[in-house]
Each structure stands twice: as structure tokens, then as C-alpha cells.
Image: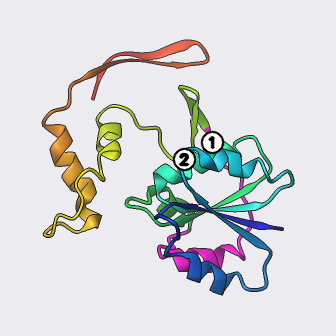
Amino acid sequence: MKHVFLLKSEGTTHSFLPTIHKIMKGYDYDIHISQYPNHVKSIMKEYRTPVRVYAVGGDGFMNQVVQALVHTKHEMVVIPYGTGNDFSRYVNNGVKKAEDVLRESLQWHAQRIDTVKMNDLYYINSGCFGIDAAIANHVHDVVNVPFIPESKSYILSILRNIKSYDFNYVTIKSNQQVLYEGQVT
């Protein structure tokens, strides 16, 4: 099976490339660096037969890959290379380091997972809206704060957003049945 690496752009190159070349020596693989939002969809149109796709990024980038792969026969491996990596921690059997996930995933067999569709987008780990989405969408707003490590940027985003967030009115439906209607955070 062919292996296809989709990497979230870090500019013109990516810091995970040397690791890919080292571990994938002897395998048939391609590498693509996503240059803009949803670039992954156009990249994946090139692959007509099933491939194993490696989403190298965080949960947001993984979600872009999911949009390109849903309803296909392609496999996906989530390589943790983002801020939160929530889904990666869950699905990769506790393996945390990106290099270890890649190495071990070469021995793993694919498993089907459920997708959920919300407002024309699919998701696989959690669908965020309200304050949770505001926190996630603004986690990278403050960069290079010397006394706060990047790993704490999520906590900083919580503190910034919780004080100014307003309630939203939502309607949650499933199969045309209203499950909840009202204000939520």
C-alpha cells in the first residue's frame, strides 16, 4: 500500500520531514505540505486507489484531512504535531511522540471509526461549538509570550475567552427531531 503524508505547513518545509525519510526508507510514499485551508481535498483527488494517509498536525489539521477522506477507502494515521492532539492521544494507544506513532503505525491494522456530520462538516473526535470553539479558534492568538510555554496556550485562551463570551441560542436536531433548543455556552 502506498503511504501519503499530509503535513500542515510550517512555511516552505516541515521539521518532521527528516523523521519521515528515516522511518519510511524502503516504503513507497509521497509527501505533501498543505499550503492553504482545505488544500488537502485537492491533494487527495490525485489518489484514486486506497492509500494510507498520515495527517501530520493537530486536531484542526486532522479535521481538514477527515473532510477529504470521509466516504473513501483510504486509511488515516494521526501523527501528533499540534497544540492539543486530543484525538491522537485517544486513537494511538497511548503512544505520544510523533516519531513513535509513525514507527508503530506501520504495524497497525486499520479500524473503522464513526463520523458525525454537523452543519455540512464531518468530525470524528468531538464537534465543538460555543465557548469551546471560541477557545480552540483563538488558542494561537498570543504567540511568543516568554513566561508561558506553548503547551499552556490552551489555558491562556480559556482565560481570555471565558470572561467575554456570550451565550448562544442553538437548535440540536437528529433525524429531523429536535433534541435541544435553547441557550448554551
108 or 62, nearer to the observer: 62
53 or 97, nearer to the observer: 53
* In magenta stretch: residue 103: yes
What label sits on residue 67 in the rendered view?
1
- Residue at x 57%, y 45% (from the top left corner): 124
| Dominant secondary structure of the residues highlighted in magenta in the image | loop
* In magenta stretch: residue 153: no
- For residue 13, side relative to residue 110 (left or right): left
- Residue at x 70%, y 81% (from the top left corner): 24
Look at the image and give the residue range highlighted in magenta: 93-115
Residue 114 visible from this viewpoint? no
What label sits on residue 63 in the rendered view?
2
- Residue at x 54%, y 79% (from the top left corner): 99
Amino acid found under the numbered disc labelled 1 = Gln
State the image quarter where residue 117 is shown: top right
Residue 125 to residue 144: above or below:
above
Dot 2 surroundings within 10 Å: few (below 14), some, or many (20 or more)? some
Instruction: Give coordinates of residue 63: x percent, y percent.
Output: 54, 47
Kind of element beneath mark 2: helix
